[in-house]
Image: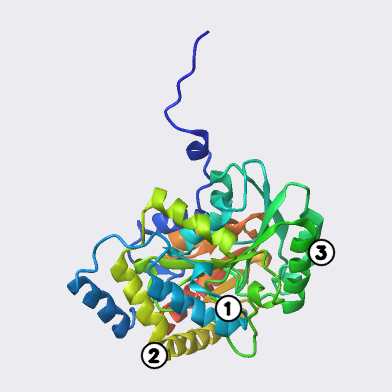
Amino acid sequence: MTRTYRRISPVAEDYPASSIRKMFNLALDFPDAVKLTVGEPDFNTPEHIKAAGIRAIENNNTRYVANAGIPELRSAIARKYSGRWDRGIGPDNVMVSFGAMEALTFALDVTVAPGEEVIIPDPSFPNYLGQVHRLGGRAVSVPVRESNDFKLRVEDVRDAITDKTAAVIINSPSNPLGSVMDRTELEQIADLADEHGFTIISDEVYDQMVFDDAVFTSIAEVRPDFDRFLAVGSFSKTYAMTGWRCGFVIGGEDLIAPMSLLQEGLTSSLPGFVQEAALAAIEGPQTAVDMMVASYAERREILIDRINAIDGLHVIRPEATFYAFVNIKEWGLGSWELAIALLENHNLATIPGSAFGPAGEGYLRLTFAVSPETINTACDRLEAFAASR
């Protein structure tokens, strides 16, 4: 019998690539393009955080540290979220990771076996699909509709549950939708988790980027005795630390403990000097965070007012994050088709809504983590496209 030899594994060969990165790469060929693509703060990391990282390097904190994170940082994260959630969180409930993506990796690793199902919102962050695929799991999408203010509804989750459901990923505040889930929905999804025995993996990286009277509730807050959750957090967005790659995950000790073993086999540990910077971020003054969030709120108003004044476009005012999910359906173009036309003909880079799932078709995601001048220039180009149709 002839054996067939393969150079590339099926997991790698079939990995679902992110269209966000695809558009980002296409935009590189248009160096003068106005970019409303990648969700990254345009602020620099606050000075006291940078100083802490530099000081740690000067003090030779450049060696291996504990796999789960330095005790000081794990304790600081535990104190912060114990206060925010009004529940007992200790350092053994915290795992420090290489950004929120590795935290999500760990959360899925400890809860999902090959062949099991993970329910995810549609539209949602596209890397959820890749992470589930990497484990040999099956992603089951449930729709998130504009008619429901882009909020995941418990009945849609309930309808998707099977005896293979191992986890449900929720994302509030939502990328790309800018919405915040209602507490009542979270409470009912928590009830489903208890009833069916699955884990809720809650992506909460935008938890401090909330505007106006919107109220963010963590899955960890729904009931003091609810423990079927893993909450994923990050320093990237809140503290403008995207390149530092510091994230974390909080959950029950039985779920957190194996993560340090997984870390040992992946990257050993996040650099100590990065963790010292993160410690300064969480324990230092929060005035820079308040300033950044206030600035995003002002930029949001510019974008929303300009978009809703363009014939054929409309957008719900985001409650949180720095994204707007713009309805383009009246223009009669596919979202990828429109994104390419805007890039090639008007030097404007956007992200097609279809990058976030089939339910994202008919939308564009625009980031307002850019200057007001950039927002206005981008909207001028959208107006020019509308006028040219």
SS at circle 1: helix
**Residues at badges 1 and 3 in contact (C-beta under 8 Å)?**
no
- Residue tagged 3: 155
- Mark on residue 12? none
* Rendered location of residue 197, percent (x, y): 74, 56
**Residues at badges 2 and 1 in contact (C-beta under 8 Å)?**
no
- Residue tagged 2: 285
SS at circle 2: loop
Q: Amino acid at mark 1?
A: Ile
Closer to the camera, 306 or 179?
A: 179
**Would residue 288 appear left or right of 113 to someone viewing this image?**
left
Q: Give whichever of discs 2 and 1 has the lower sequence position.
A: 2
**Residues at badges 2 and 3 in contact (C-beta under 8 Å)?**
no
- Residue tagged 1: 307
* Rendered location of residue 291, percent (x, y): 43, 90
Q: Give whichever of discs 2 and 3 has the lower sequence position.
A: 3
Residue name at image x 40 percent, y 52 percent: 264
Residue name at image x 40 percent, y 88 percent: 288
| Residue at the limit of the structure toward the top, as seen here | 1
Q: How far separated are the C-alphas under marks 1 and 3?
A: 32 Å
- Res 310 quadrant in image: bottom right
Q: How many marks?
A: 3
**Would residue 284 appear left or right of 153 to someone viewing this image?**
left
Closer to the camera, 271 or 235?
A: 271
